[in-house]
Each structure stands twice: as structure tokens, then as C-alpha cells.
Amino acid sequence: MKAATLYESSVSSFKKVFNNPNPEQIEEIKKILKPLFKHIVENTILLHDLLSITEHDFSTYVHSVNVGIMATSLAINFSKSYEYIEMDELERQCYGFFLHDIGKAKVPIEILRKEGALNDEEWTIMKKHPEWGYTILMETGHLTDEAAYISMQHHERPDGTGYPFGLSDIHPCARICTIADIFDALELMKKEISTEFDNCLINTFITMLGPKNSPAYIEH
Ligand SMILES: [Fe+2]
Ligand SMILES: [Fe+2]
């Protein structure tokens, strides 16, 4: 119950922030995220509940909350297993993850909701959302170092094929965000698949890409 309430109130306040990304709305988001962050850190059962109720649709606010939850959990678990991260830093990362796509508030809704592929002109606009996100966070006084890296670099790729700058040196917290971002898109793709056969194909595909076949696994 508690998990569902937290999830729903986060999604509905993200609706407001995407319609009007002003300093007060972002402050409001942080107020809601503060207890959510504490619950994710302290209570793994709640995290499991949160992940089981995440919805998948094309709206940027549902996506923001899903990526926020998954990336925060990933950062916490990574910190436990590999590289210790201070709690304050994790909290700043958490706000950055939830707000990673805030720049999409400036992308016209027809482009965000368009079914099928974007044309070149639309794609050029879409690719501006990392910089627009950075600007919104700066103008509203919410630009921490972590939020800056996450908003600017979550579409950069280590091989230099990403955007907006084609960087190869990408901050770790932006990489964490990218993993959660890709996962949410994959889950959405699964929802869009209508036949049992397609579902089998995609599950096979996910398994094929799983840890057993990854170079990291072979090396260990
Ligand atoms: Fe994005
Ligand atoms: Fe995203």
C-alpha cells in the first residue's frame, strides 16, 4: 500500500513539474523524493514492491519515476558491492536520476508522443533535451554536480557514439542512469509486444544478452 502511494504521488508530481518546471515545483519533487530515497536505502522489501508496481507507458513522468527508482537502487547496490558512495552524494544522485529527462519539458508534446520514427528535424529537437535539462536545473537553482552530469551525459556512450557531445569519458553516475534508462525502454518494448510468440522472442533476446554471454562474465 505504502509503496503504491509513494509511486503514485511521485508520478503525479512529475506530471506537474513537466508542465511547469519552475523552482517551486522542483522543490516539491524533492520533498516527495526525500522519504522515497530513505525507504529505498533502508528497506529492500519496499524496493521490491516499488519495482513490481512500476507502470510502462510513453509519458515522460512515468518514465522519470521508473528510472529514478531503478537508478537509485542500482547506485545503492553498486556502492555496497564495489565502490562506497557517501549518503549525501547518493541522495543528490537520486534527485538527478529522477530529473534526468526534465529537459523534455521543452520538447513539443507532438514529438514526445509521436508513434513511429522521428524525422531528422524532430530528432534534432529531441537531442537537445540533455542541454535543456541542464539549463532548467541551473535556472531553478537545483543544479548539483551530480544532476549536471546525469542530465547532460545520460545519452553519451563510452564508444563516443552518444549525444550531445559524443564524449567517451562519462561520469559514473550518468552511466548508472543510462543502464536504468535502457532497461525502462526495454520493459516498455515488452509491453508493446502483442503476441505470445514476440514475447518469447524478446525474452530469448534478453537472456541472450544476459551475464552469461557478456565479456565481463567471461573475464571473471
Ligand atoms: Fe533522456
Ligand atoms: Fe530517459
Image (spheres, grey):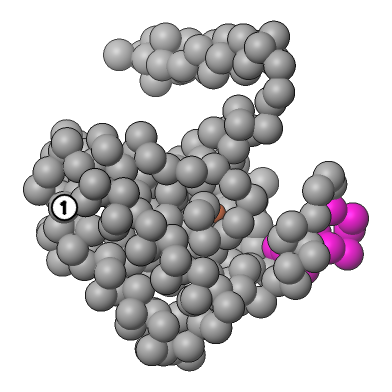
- Front residue of 135 and 161: 135
**Residue at 42%, 55% in the rendered image:** 65
Q: Which residue is mark 1?
A: 39
Q: Position of residue 215 (x, y in %)?
A: 45, 17
Percent position (x, y) of residue 119? Answer: 89, 55
Magenta residue span? 118-127
Image side of residue 17 versus residue 51, left or right? right
**Image point (67%, 46%), residue name:** 161
Q: Main secondary structure of the magenta part?
A: helix
Quarter of the image for the C terminus: give it: top left
Left or right for 202, reference 84: right
Which residue appears at 52% of the width and 61% of the height? 61
Q: In this rendering, does residue 144 appear at all?
A: no
Q: Nearer the viewer, residue 169 or 18?
A: 18
**Number of numbered callouts drawn:** 1
Relative to 21, does residue 202 appear above or below in the rendering? above
Q: Is residue 189 visible?
A: yes
Q: Is residue 107 magenta?
A: no
User: Residue 38 lies in what quarter of the image?
Assistant: bottom left
Residue sticking out furthest to the left: 42
Whether the magenta-drawn stretch holds residue 125 is answered as yes
